[in-house]
């Protein structure tokens, strides 16, 4: 059986809408992710170098959800952080995500937490205090790994994003102190 025959049907409308919320105005991204879902072998050939760096060594290992997380990161619409990170690094990442969303925020309180490594979820409460007045929320795409694929979205879009992810048999969660727990 060829790899192309193994492509799984995906709710393309839900996927397109989800992408439009996470990375507005990027039609190329939608095409690439649909390609990963519908023609994993072609997608693998197109992005083989990037995929190999992320541990994907064959078209059999292509997952549209992981492709989505990886391509969103390339477009700077998400950022992957380890389960343990430094306050200074998290502040820098949040600044970049907020810039993409055109949301000015003062991340200095997180940056002041320094260079000690802590579980990343320990920063969640302070992050949300900064985002709440902006009507923004930090979310993460659950890729079933020990890292978080983070994005900042309008709070009013969170429920819709979660429903769209559910329609795609995946999860987008609010990044809180329990992030990563079963």
Image: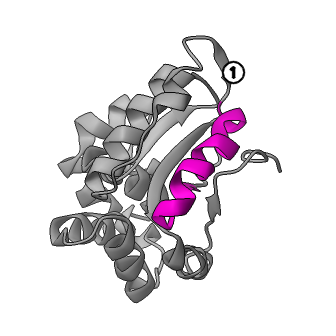
Question: Percent x, y for residue 169?
Answer: 62, 73
Rendered position, 126 above or below 1 = above
Q: Is residue 62 magenta?
A: no
In the image shown, does 46 or 33 lie closer to the viewer? 33
Rendered position, 111 above or below 39 = above
81 left or right, relative to 96: right
Q: Residue furthest bottom?
A: 13
**Chief SS of the magenta region:** helix
Instruction: Report the colour scheme.
Output: one colour
| Residue underneath mark 1 | 118
Question: Percent x, y for residue 40?
Answer: 34, 61
Q: Quadrant of the N terminus?
A: bottom left
Q: Residue furthest right?
A: 182
In the image shown, does 87 or 30 lie closer to the viewer? 87
- Residue ID at (69%, 21%): 118
Q: Residue furthest top?
A: 116
- Residue ID at (39%, 49%): 78
Rendered position, 98 above or below 18 = above
Residue 43 in view (yes/no):
yes
Q: What residue span does the magenta drawing correspond to?
A: 120-140
Q: Quadrant of residue 159?
A: bottom right
Q: Quadrant of residue 64?
A: bottom left
Q: Secondary structure at mark 1?
A: strand
Residue 137 in view (yes/no):
no
In the image shown, does 39 or 143 lie closer to the viewer? 143
User: Counting other residues with Cα less than 10 Å from the Cα at mark 1, is it few (<14), some (14-19), or many (20 or more)?
Assistant: some
Rendered position, 84 above or below 147 = above
Question: Percent x, y for residue 103?
Answer: 34, 56
- Residue ID at (37%, 73%): 21
- Residue ID at (53%, 71%): 155
Instruction: Count the marks.
Output: 1
């Amino acid at each position: 059986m060829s790899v192309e025959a193994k492509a799984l049907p995906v709710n393309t409308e839900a996927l397109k809408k989800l992408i439009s919320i996470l990375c507005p105005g990027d039609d190329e991204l939608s095409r690439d992710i649909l390609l990963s879902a519908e023609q994993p072998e072609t997608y693998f050939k197109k992005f083989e170098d990037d995929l190999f760096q992320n541990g994907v060594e064959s078209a059999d290992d292509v997952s549209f959800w992981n492709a989505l997380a990886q391509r969103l990161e390339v477009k700077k619409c998400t950022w992957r952080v380890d389960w343990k990170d430094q306050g200074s690094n998290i502040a820098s990442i949040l600044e970049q995500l907020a810039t993409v969303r055109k949301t000015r925020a003062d991340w200095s309180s997180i940056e002041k937490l320094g260079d000690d490594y802590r579980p990343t979820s320990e920063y969640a409460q302070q992050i949300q205090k900064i985002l709440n007045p902006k009507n923004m929320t930090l979310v993460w795409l659950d890729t079933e790994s020990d890292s978080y694929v983070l994005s900042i979205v309008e709070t009013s879009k969170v429920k819709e994003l979660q429903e769209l992810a559910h329609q795609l048999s995946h999860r987008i969660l609010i990044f809180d102190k329990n992030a990563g727990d079963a």
